[in-house]
Amino acid sequence: MPAPTAPAALYRHSLRLLLDKNISAWVALWAEDGLMEFPFAPDGWPQRLEGKEAIAAYMRHYPDHVDLHDFSDLRIHQTTDPQTIVVEMRGTGRLVESDAPFDMTYIAVVTVQEGHITSYRDYWNPLAVLKPGTDFTRSSR
């Protein structure tokens, strides 16, 4: 079954893929020249990823470090641009290395064109990734 193309439906589908730890299918939702930005990223974390390949490399080891269980409190707001949504949500789960709880709130501004994510500005809490076991940008093996 193909991925949905409307921004809100595509975003909900992307969350299901993350919960299923299907990173390759999640990356497939991106446009080749997609842009992912993290305006509040702390030192040592990327602030900007350009292109599907860079996004794939960034997310490759995510399930080795963070075991997501749920995205609760999901609110998707339509903007005046029908291709852009603003998302509020809470991601919960556990950190694989320490078995400590993972609890992060997010606000994201997401643009979808022709059924692919072209822009994703992720305003997550930088303090949450300073805990041991949260750096999924590298292999744990």
Image (cartoon, rainbow, N blue to C red):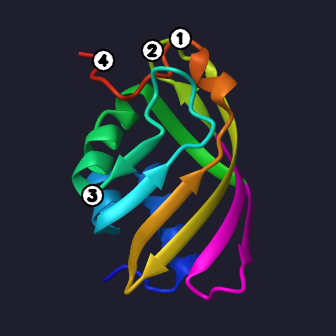
User: Residue 105: where, in percent of width, then height?
Assistant: 72, 42
Q: Position of residue 32 (x, y in %)?
A: 25, 67
Label 2–label 4 contact, CB within 8 A: yes
Q: Amino acid at mark 1?
A: Pro
Helix, strand or loop for disc 1? loop
Q: Which residue is mark 1?
A: 132
Spatial CA distance of label 4 from label 3 is: 22 Å
Q: Given the image, on which type of amino acid does mark 2 rest?
A: Glu
Q: Are marks 1 and 4 in contact (CB under 8 Å)?
A: no
User: Is disc 3 surrounded by few (<14), some (14 to 19) or many (20+) residues within 10 Å?
Assistant: many
Residue labelled with disc 4: 140
**Reading the chain from its start, which is encountered first: label 4 or label 3?**
3
Name the residue tied to disc 2. Answer: 97
Please name the residue that numbered disc 3 is placed on. Answer: 52
What is the C-alpha distance between the residues marked 2 and 4?
9 Å
Quarter holding the N terminus is bottom left
| 130 lies left or right of 89 | left
**Which tag is nearer the camera, tag 1 or tag 2?**
1
Magenta stretch: give its range. 73-91
Residue 87 among magenta residues: yes
